Image: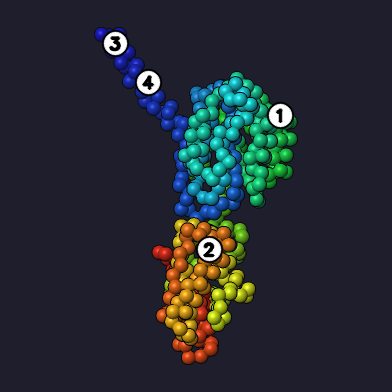
Amino acid sequence: MIRNLAHLILLISFLPTAAAARDDLTFQVTDLSSKGYVPRVQTFVILVDGSSSMRAKTHGFDKIDVARAAAQSLAQAIPPLDYRGGVRAFGQERLYPNGETTLLYGMDRYSASRARDAIDRVECSYGDTPLSTALDAAAHDLSGATGETAVFVISDGLEMGNDEVAAARRLHQRANACIYAIQVGVSRDGTEMLQRIVDAAGCGEVVPVWDLKQKHAMSHVVIAGLLAGDGDRDGVADHKDRCLDTAAGTPVDANGCPPKGLEVTNDLWRLPVRFAFDSTVIEGEYRQALDDIAVYLKRNKHVSMVVEGHADGMGDAQYNQRLSERRAQVTRDYLVSRGVAAGRLSVEAYGASQPIADNDSRANRAKNRRTQFRILGESTVTSR
């Protein structure tokens, strides 16, 4: 009985330690989806080290377990914006065919759940650390991307050398990539090596994995690598936004400013787009207003729109009904041609039944020949 009691005491004393140990591999994740950010890059890759050096311990844990936990938290912290992403392991030649580096997920529209499933499959091998091969492969993964890209490297930084530095330089040249390295372990040699790799890329940073235990620290890595501030939430990053205090819901151009000539009256956005008499042609001088609406819709993918067609009071009512329908349809087609998903646009036609001015003069009739845009659940945009 004494022996059994001793075993029980030993077990009880062990349980809190085991729980604490599990907690030590928990990295806090902050929800960034509603914090006023927009993508700074469109494409990224997460590289996870599964080479033999990752079998060693750091703070009492296998490095590979720490790397997976950190990668999982990184993947979860990336907000569901319009990214193209992937997960690639390296140093696993005994586990996968051609396993010096293996693309486990991607390159697809980014899904945090699929990325985390891929990270779960990263295991430790007995191979070398071919980060140079992984960086060259990442350059291929990122091919076709426009603008800057990002590569996250989760590794201890050991068993590397000049080949990795040269590969980082090639990566930046080929894919305009910045490298953000999370060092698993506390080796000074590993820190210096990862810093050389980041410096070769010309941008990025090195972060010790245990520093990411601090609140919001993982979010700072995501922000540095992928996001830009958007204080007025108009879809234009602050460093490109020339109008930083645009009212919520206002359509903006590529500079973050309301379209030239915009008049805001209550819930109406009035844009100077008009049709000639008996015409469905969108004149070139008015197309910029529609381009601005297309930009707004592409940046606010949750918004759907009804395109309403209108006519003046001249002529047969049935003819005006058909004319207003054609105006609405041609306007919808124009927005689709500018990249707005057709499923987000519906068409309604009102003929001459909803004038915004009396039909008693040529100028007033011109105001009534219009298309009108009703944004479902928000304000109404009107082009006259």
Badge 1: residue crowd in 10 Å (few <14, some 14–19, many ≥20): some
Q: Name the amino acid type tagged 4.
A: Phe
Q: Quadrant of residue 138?
A: top right
Disc 1 and disc 4: Cα gap in Å? 42 Å
- Residue 281, horizontal then vertical, whole percent: 58, 74
Q: Could you tell me residue 353's position as x and y percent?
A: 41, 80
Q: Could you say where residue 44 lies in the image, as x and y percent from the top left?
A: 59, 43
How far separated are the C-alphas under marks 3 and 2? 71 Å
Mark 3 or mark 2, which is nearer to you?
Answer: 2
Q: Is residue 300 visible?
A: no
What number is the disc on residue 332?
A: none
User: Which one is closest to the eye, mark 1 or mark 4?
Assistant: 1
- Under tag 2, what secondary structure? helix
Cα separation, mark 4 vs mark 3, equals 15 Å
Q: Nearer the viewer, mark 1 or mark 2?
A: 2
Residue at numbered disc 4: 14
